[in-house]
Image (spheres, rainbow, N blue to C red):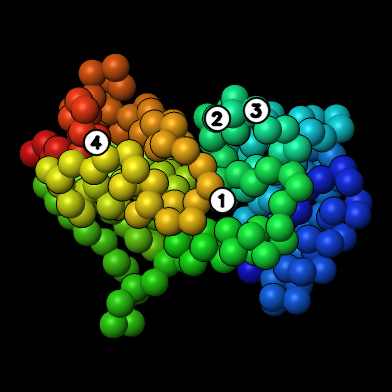
Amino acid sequence: MKILVVDDEKVIVKAIKFNLERDGYTVEVAYDGEEALKIARDKTISLVILDLMLPKIDGLTVCQKIREFSNVPIIMVTAKTEDMDKIMGLEYGADDYVTKPFNILELKARVKAILRRVTPIAPNGGENLRINTGSVELDYNRRTVTIGGKTVDLTGKEFDLMDLLVSNAGKVYSRESLLDLVWGYEYPGDIRTVDVHVRRLREKIEPNSAEPVYLLTKWGAGYYFKDVH
């Protein structure tokens, strides 16, 4: 798998590259946003580690532009601690984030977890794994959702969230439960991460995101999926 590391601090890039290559990954590097976008467009990338503060084009803009042509998983890296920076990264399409200074072991664990989730695995050697529930179809090879006859491209975390809710239609999950089940028990983020991803999902799957019919809220309890036949 090929990982793109984007940061203008060459010492950090060198350290991340060294550690990821030791784990068997191929690593591409970029030191500014313009270079990052070119590599993301021209090469097949499995995951992007993207710094927020970049020369030429900032990380948020890079993330947004990548989302215009790719659903590659993106881990946003920021030296800032303000919650708004983290939330903005998620709003712009990042799947996860880490805050500098970070532990390289933590970053590698995030990389492995995300790549494990987005790598299609069909049981019993199957080549085309899909699940149909009424008007909704999940394609696990392409990691896409078809709903109401419309195919929707989702980011890694959006697909994981959709998978859990669709597979357990009608069951209400609290935001804390979703954070544990989709992001993992050791995820250092907060429950607003769930709200951001639910909002993004609604914008993609609902006829009118302001009046959802599939991904519903049980006030005071959490979120659940209602299949509409």
State the count of labels.
4
How far apart marks 1 and 4 lie (CA) works out to 24 Å
The residue that appears at 66% across and 51% down in the rendered structure is 48
| 4 or 3: tag closer to the N-terminus | 3
Q: Secondary structure at mark 3?
A: loop
The mark nearer the N terminus, 1 or 3, is 1
Q: Name the mark nearer the viewer: 1 or 3.
A: 3
- The answer to whether residue 18 is above or below residue 50 is below
Above or below, comparing residue 71 to residue 90 in the picture? below
Few, some or many residues within 10 Å of mark 2 (<14, 14–19, 20+) = some
Q: Nearer the viewer, residue 53 or 48?
A: 53
Quadrant, the C terminus: top left
- Expressed as whole percent of the image width and height from the top left, the position of residue 220 reads 21, 28
Label drawn at residue 46: none
Question: How far apart are the alpha carbons under marks 4 and 3?
Answer: 27 Å
Query: Which residue is located at x 43 percent, y 56 percent?
Result: 184
Residue 70 x, y percent position in the rendering: 57, 45
Residue at disc 4, secondary structure: strand
Q: Which residue is mark 3?
A: 82
Disc with the residue nearer the chain's start (2 vs 4): 2
The foreground one among 109 and 212 is: 109
Residue 63 in sight: yes
Q: Earlier along the polypeptide chain: callout 3 or callout 2?
A: 3
Q: Residue 87, which numbered label?
A: 2
In this view, which residue lies farthest toward the top? 210
Amino acid type at mark 1: Pro
Find out whether the residues at labels 2 and 4 contact each other: C-beta distance under 8 Å.
no
Classify the position of the N terminus by image quarter.
bottom right
Q: Please give the residue where the numbered disc 4 appears in the rendered image.
A: 223
